[in-house]
Amino acid sequence: MSPENSGPAAVIVLAAGAGTRMKSRTPKILHEIGGRSLIGHALAAARTIAPRELALVVRHERDLVASHIAALDPDALIVDQDDVPGTGRAVEAALEALDASDSRGPLSGTVVVTYGDVPLLTGALLAELVATHEADANAVTVLTAVLDDATGYGRILRAADGTVTGIREHKDATEAERAIREINSGIYAFDAAVLRGALMHVTTDNAQGEKYLTDVLGLARAAGGRVAAVVTEDRWQVEGANDRVQLAALGAEHNRRTVEAWMRSGVTVVDPATTWIDATVTLDEDVRLLPNTQLHGATTVARDAVVGPDTTLTDVHVGEGAKVIRTHGTGATIGAKASVGPFTYLRPGTVLGETGKIGAFYETKNVTIGRGSKLSHLGYAGDAEIGEDTNIGCGNITANYDGDKKHRTVIGSGVRTGSNTVFVAPVKLGDGAYSGAGAVIRRDVPAGALALSLAEQRNTEGWVIAKRPGTISAALAAAAGSEAAAPATSHTPAPTEEG
Ligand code: UD1
Ligand code: CA
């Protein structure tokens, strides 16, 4: 046993059910809250208690579910349940597979059973269940909760002295038993040998014709084992997501908990109700999140950065002291003390250097922007590299796509580009180069050169009065003393663009 696997012998996660109430082509346990699939939450909680083995039982949409699990947790053992229904059968299949996969022979010690669709269950509560189970040398310890409405759940049966004697499924229960409000969460710690022995005697002789895992409690007691319960006050931790209403409620509660945990660790959240943070996000102390901010995926925000309002970031790294206002970003890195927004769209591969700026109405993609460089207003920068302390003028565009392939624009340091410059890639501008307003850069610009695209302006005097009579423009032109009654053209031929 390696020290990092010092927890129970195994965790078995049950995930074979169909989840029909979700009414979805996506298997229920692949639906997400907090940026993780339901099964992803179950795996994360299970891994926290460092089991020596982790098995998941699958059947419905087997291949989709199995490949999702394999991607999340390659060491997990995927077990197929046969067509005998019931939670007891599912656990039996998992035990057989675990026993067969381990060269040291049958599992011994504690086996934890959980479900793939209970996303708020924490590793801490599982650890408490295991600790109680082992400290009291129980044969079975079941996690229970007391609900106002226990309809549908298995009920916990207790003797007059409070001893847990068994579990009765709702469909098999008498009226008196249905009045019991303590429910079976479906999460347990078992002694492996007791579990293996009892499952051999579980039948399908019940209202649903299923092999009930819950029958193990009565069988364990009959064999002389201690059966007990850990009662949790936190009903959210045992709540399953069976339909989309429950999914949303669990998602909101998950978020409430995540946001609260970040506030307790030093993050300012101005409006917790409109701030959504995935389980996978990392925030430093003294980060400030303004209203309507959503942080997803592997997003990280460093100390003193301010994000929001109205900002959605997915897999974005925000540097120390940076400001990101009203921005939609994915796969971007924002340097320390840099500023982004408002109304900015950062696409994957955007890397903004320290103290740099991507301002209002900018779209960026696959662009590296050096320290102190500014793209302040209205433009597109894609497939480009920009040096340090460069100022990109208003309305600049990298014309990176020739209709067939994408090409790169390389702009040096200390460059100043005029408004509405278009970079027709592939093209390079050397350090310290300038461009004039409206320049269309089709050829490389050497360091320190000024690039202009000149098409001389032509004014046709008196044109409005002659061609747009009766308009307000014509009236105002006349009032302005436009004496020219007939058009007179001044025109010199324009030089070619390359000058
Ligand atoms: C089960 C419990 C019930 C408990 C409830 C909590 C049994 C007999 N009953 O109810 O006491 O209050 O959970 O939610 O155990 N699964 C499989 N294979 C199967 C059947 C189910 O893997 O053949 C999985 C499902 O995917 C799900 C979990 O087991 O994750 C529970 O199944 P579900 O049908 O929702 O629970 P019940 O049997 O109704
Ligand atoms: Ca259920």
Image: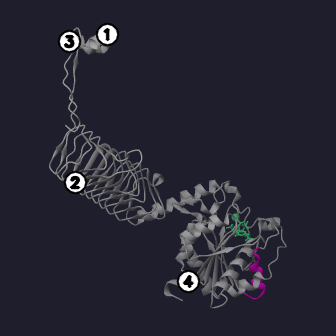
Assign a secondary structure to mark 4: loop
Give the mark toward the camera: 3 or 2. 2
- Picture coordinates of residue 30, whole percent (x, y): 60, 62
Task: Locate residue 236 relative to residue 420 in the image: left or right.
Answer: right
Q: Amino acid at mark 2?
A: Gly
Q: Amino acid at mark 1?
A: Pro
Residue named by callout 4: 7
Magenta stretch: residue 228 in it? no
Residue drawn at point x = 72 percent, y = 87 percent: 225
- Picture coordinates of residue 202, whole percent (x, y): 80, 79
Residue drawn at point x = 83 percent, y = 67 percent: 207
Residue named by callout 2: 412
Residue named by callout 1: 469
User: What is the span of residues highlighted in magenta in the rendered image?
Assistant: 212-225
Inter-mark Cα distance, 4 to 1: 89 Å
Assign a secondary structure to mark 1: loop
